Image: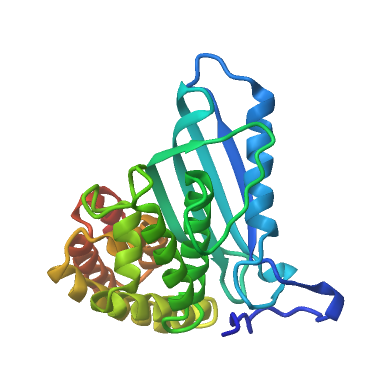
Amino acid sequence: MLRILSFLITLFSPLSIYSQELNTKVIINTEKLQSSESLIFEEMQNSIEQFLNNKIWTEDKFESEERINCNFIINILNEPSSNIYEATVQIVSSRPIFNSSYESILFNHGDREWVFEYLPSQNIEFTENGFNDNLTSLISFYAFIIIGTDYDSFEKLGGDESFQKAWKILNESQNSGYKGWDQFGSKQNRYWICENFINPEFRPVREAIYNYHLSGLDSFYSNPEESRDIILNNLIEINKVNTKNFNSSILNLFINAKSDEITNIFKEAPLSVKRNAYNVLMELSPSNSDLFNKILE
């Protein structure tokens, strides 16, 4: 499968082709630590960033402009023992929208169970068979989730292979003793994120997300009225799944990534469209009522 980016108007040259898929920025924040050695965290930041950006994650070929923009903001909270770190991470990825300079957020997730060991001068290496260490598993898992969500936005169910690779990492990490890898934790943890993406019950959500982007957003600047109708119809399809699976991980991920964007899309719509969108959104995510109220202002 080749990632579809037909909307990018570029000059193609054999020398400009990359295999790497990710264009990642990593930030390590140590403000919560009472004392810290800045050099090791600078090294950690560079090591994680280089690993994510230099590893070849798929068999597809990417132009430099096609690489997936993403950020990992890692907040180190504690060092309970030597070289063991407790942290949280916020991960955000986006994709460009046709005929605009706008980047649409695809994945926006905070992982609160980010615990890992990091040794000075540690070389991060990923192997597909077996558990190496939790840091490698964490960043590799999310690399495949990011790629999968990106592929899903360009091709219907295009992220299947990447989600299966993330699932394999998850299975190999479940006996590691680290939190976040099993089904008994939070319903928004790594297990449920990946389970939802590969569960056939949630395929209508993934298909609606594909239509939302390729038929809705990518046509918005040329035909906003039709695009709003397409986006609204796909929100309705997503909400059908939501009525049976309220507060599921994949639906929360969608709302986390899209709530601001959707609000802005419908603020300029005709009143009848505004009301329909508002009603669907309030069923999808009643906790975002303050934000969605702006649609009707």
The residue under the point 29% across, 80% down is 204
Please say whether residue 223 is visible from this viewpoint: yes
**Going by the image, does 36 lie left or right of 234?**
right
Tally of numbered discs: 0
Indicate whether 293 appears above or below 16.
Answer: above
In the picture, the quarter occupied by the N terminus is bottom right
Can you tell which quarter of the image residue 239 is in? bottom left
Choose between 228 and 269: the one closer to the eye.
228
Q: Position of residue 254 (x, y in %)?
A: 35, 63
In the picture, the quarter occupied by the C terminus is bottom left
Indicate whether 174 appears above or below 159.
Answer: above
Q: Position of residue 287 (x, y in %)?
A: 21, 50
Please say whether residue 295 is visible from this viewpoint: no
**Going by the image, does 99 lie left or right of 291?**
right
The residue under the point 60% across, 83% down is 2
Can you tell which quarter of the image residue 54 is in? bottom right
The residue under the point 28% across, 56% down is 292
The residue under the point 40% across, 58% down is 172
Residue at far left of view: 244
Q: Position of residue 188 (x, y in %)?
A: 29, 52
**Colour theme:** rainbow
Choose between 165 and 258: the one closer to the eye.
165
Choose between 224 and 137: the one closer to the eye.
137
